[in-house]
Image (cartoon, helix red, strand yellow):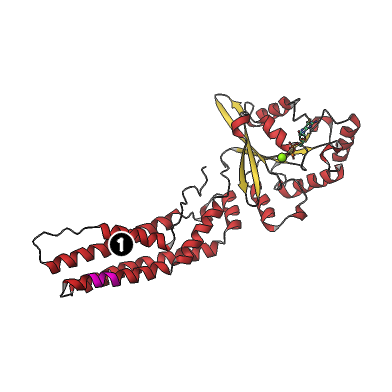
Amino acid sequence: MKNPFSSFYHVPDSKELLDIAFGRAMKSSAQVSKNAPILLKAKKKELKRIKVAIDELVEKVLTIIKSVPVINDLPDFYRELASLLVDVDELRLNLGKLNGILPILSKLEREYSKKLSQIEAPKDADRIRRSAFGRISSIIGKQRESLEYLNSVRGRLREIPSIDDTLHCIVVAGYPNVGKSSFVRQISTNKKIEVQEYPFTTKKLIMGHFDVEKQFEKIKIQFLDTPGILDRPMAKRNNIELQAILALRLISDLIIFIFDPTPACGYSIESQLDLYHEVKNNFTREGKIDIVIIFNKMDLASEIEIEFLRDQLKIKESECFLINALSGENLHLIEEYLSKRYGKEN
Ligand SMILES: Nc1nc2c(ncn2[C@@H]2O[C@H](COP(=O)(O)OP(=O)(O)O)[C@@H](O)[C@H]2O)c(=O)[nH]1
Ligand SMILES: [Mg+2]
């Protein structure tokens, strides 16, 4: 699906709202015959101005309210992230306040049209319209904080990347420098344009795509490379990062965990194993998400290093992929695995 926040447009502040409404009002012209008495003309002119200003504001406020997504109705992934970035109760409260001015504006319109109908001198019409505009300004002015709040919420929500939750999603994990980015770049079908960066709470998220042929259709798989998110021990994270990780679980159906069996990445095998177990325990939704193990840097790794890592993981040779993410060596094995998993033989 499309990012549910993409139609949450800029929220005007109270001054912008008033400028638009009063500007429109003053440009409006009432339908009244040339020969009508001056008093009637004045009444009609000012009545029209008040009506246009209020109609304009009602419409703008309704548009704002409608453009705010209902967070509780969003798909799981977006809902979790959105509730993390935004206090849902505070949002509801501010929307409620804004909504509350609609009947007040309508009431004001009725009140002032009555006042206008009772005047006896043409010059009173202008005075009454000014008084109406003053009341309108004060009503809208009191919404300043709510409007600012909504605009700040909009800014926060738009930081959530549009991950297509109808596509398969593979999250790539492993310590920094093990070769995650190189792997995503190398496996992405269209390397130049498709590996893109998105902000993701305090971090960024890099997305690549890989196409799998399935009979007559192409299935697109998304790869998520998450620097700073799934590349270090969970204990080192703040709450937002932890929640962001948990939200990622909701859209992932496979984890690719990359090891560097050599000392090249700068992290010991022991730390890499700890992270692997942590990801496995916290991220796989009790085994619902599979983990695929990759040993990268096969060009640098010695047979001893590879065997040692395999022993530590208690896995057989056939249970991990040995690749070179830079040259692409053995990458076809992973592509075949993905094709089997998502494509033809399913
Ligand atoms: N020799 C060798 N270097 C690699 C391989 N894969 C990645 N690298 C290098 O390792 C470093 C870290 O790679 P990067 O993809 O940025 O790792 P990330 O931090 O996990 O995303 C870079 O200098 C890469 O060029 C590999 O298979 N062999
Ligand atoms: Mg990287």
- Depth check: give the residue in front, 45 or 60: 45
Above or below residue 301? Residue 52 is: below
Q: Position of residue 325 (x, y in %)?
A: 75, 30
Which residue is rendered at x = 10% and y = 66% of the image?
Answer: 37
- Depth check: give the residue in front, 70 or 230: 230
Disc 1 is placed on an element classified as: helix
- Depth check: give the residue in front, 175 or 147: 147
Furthest toward the right, the residue is: 304
Crowd class of label 1 (few under 14; some 14 to 19; many from 20; radius 10 Å): many
Above or below residue 190? Residue 32 is: below
Q: Position of residue 165 (x, y in %)?
A: 57, 42
Of the 4 image quadrants, the one containing the C terminus is top right
Any atom of ligand 2 within 8 Å of the CB at mark 1? no
Above or below residue 239? Residue 304 is: above
Q: Residue 307: name its quadrant.
A: top right
- Residue 130 lies in magenta, yes or no? yes
For label 1, the residue is 53
Which residue is rendered at x = 63% and y = 31% of the image?
Answer: 342
Ligand 2's quadrant is: top right
Left or right? Give the position of 142 relative to 294: left
Which residue is rendered at x = 77% and y = 29% of the image?
Answer: 324
Q: Position of residue 247 (x, y in %)?
A: 64, 50
- Depth check: give the residue in front, 131 or 300: 131
Residue interval drawn in magenta: 126-131
Q: Residue 30: name its quadrant.
A: bottom left
Magenta portion: prevailing SS class: helix
